[in-house]
Image (tube, rainbow, N blue to C red):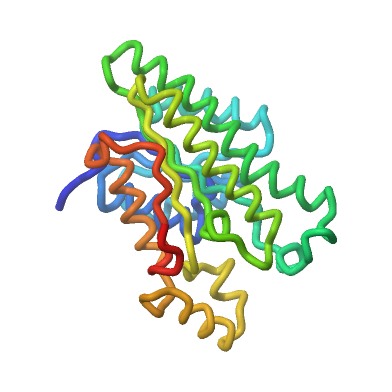
């Protein structure tokens, strides 16, 4: 087995279930990374790590709160010394009430809720982690690190529903590009995963069987993606195998949006 992330310290936000959980498990069990599973509730993170093998640790963080991010960084750096990989997976929960509203009917409060977590949460934690990565790079030549932001295919191709989510996910693509351009000389790489129909509790289980079947026909592969498939791609791009690529938006949707 190729241990792509051996000796790496990885942080995965929103990783107690779904795609985040699959990424954390892939990092720890199959790629030997020391992996920090994050949740707003420490007990939820603890429950998650009990289901994962390898070196995993539970941590509490609310990415929408500056003080919580600072506390998390202080505790993580004190315990582990550094962060090599950050996956900004935490996002505002899927809300069908917001998703199916027409754009002009979406309220300021609803937009703010999504921006605060999906965009500003990624910005807050990325800034904090970049500071630590720069210090690491200064002390050890070309050490750097990797930041992975989570987006979606509507951010590229558009969608008739979910305008607030789409707008914020498009901003995450821009965040990746800013990080990649500004910090490439410090060997800090950044990527975006633009996800299509991935079978998670938030999506697949919220649909009727008819809706699931329609969604399965959208990609050229004619099926839903699995969280584990996203996780394997995340592990690959976080590894040194991608050492001379950065700023990329990697579409994971079974061939729906050809980007």
Q: Residue at x 28, y 14 (%)?
A: 140
Q: What x and y, as percent, mark residue 11?
A: 44, 39
Say if 214 sits above or below 20 in the image.
below
Q: Residue at x 57, y 38 (%)?
A: 122
Q: Residue at x 38, y 75 (%)?
A: 220
Say if 52 sits above or below 4 in the image.
below
Position of residue 220 in the picture relative to residue 206 (left or right): left
Residue at the farthest top position: 139
> Is residue 36 in sight in this rendering?
no
Residue at the farthest bottom position: 210
Q: Quadrant of residue 222?
A: bottom left
Q: Nearer the viewer, residue 150 or 105?
A: 105
Number of numbered callouts drawn: 0
Q: Residue at x 78, y 66 (%)?
A: 101
Quadrant in the picture for the C terminus: bottom left
Residue at the farthest left position: 1
Q: What x and y, as percent, mark residue 149?
A: 49, 44
Q: Nearer the viewer, residue 142 or 248?
A: 248
Say if 191 sits above or below 52 in the image.
above
Q: What x and y, as percent, mark residue 172?
A: 56, 43
């Amino acid at each position: 087995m190729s241990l792509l992330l051996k000796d790496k310290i990885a942080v995965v936000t929103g990783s107690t279930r779904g795609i985040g959980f699959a990424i954390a498990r892939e990092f720890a069990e199959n790629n030997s990374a020391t992996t920090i599973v994050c949740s707003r509730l420490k007990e939820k993170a603890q429950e998650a790590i009990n289901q994962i093998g390898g070196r995993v640790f539970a941590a509490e963080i609310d990415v929408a709160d500056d003080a919580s991010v600072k506390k998390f960084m202080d505790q993580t750096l004190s315990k582990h010394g550094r962060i090599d990989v950050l996956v900004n997976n935490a996002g505002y929960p899927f809300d069908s009430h917001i998703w199916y509203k027409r754009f002009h009917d979406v309220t300021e409060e609803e937009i703010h809720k999504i921006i605060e977590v999906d965009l500003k949460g990624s910005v807050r934690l990325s800034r904090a982690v970049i500071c630590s990565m720069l210090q690491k790079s200064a002390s050890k030549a070309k050490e750097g690190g990797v930041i992975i932001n989570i987006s979606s295919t509507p951010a590229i191709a558009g969608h008739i529903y979910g305008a607030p989510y789409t707008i914020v996910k498009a901003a995450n693509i821009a965040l990746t590009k800013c990080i990649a351009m500004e910090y490439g000389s410090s060997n800090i790489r950044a990527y975006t995963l633009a996800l299509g129909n991935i079978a998670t509790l938030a999506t697949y289980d919220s649909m009727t069987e008819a809706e699931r079947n329609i969604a399965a026909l959208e990609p050229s592969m004619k099926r839903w993606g699995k969280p584990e498939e996203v996780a394997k791609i995340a592990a690959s791009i976080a590894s040194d195998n991608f050492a001379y690529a950065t700023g990329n938006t990697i579409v994971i949707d079974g061939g729906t949006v050809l980007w």
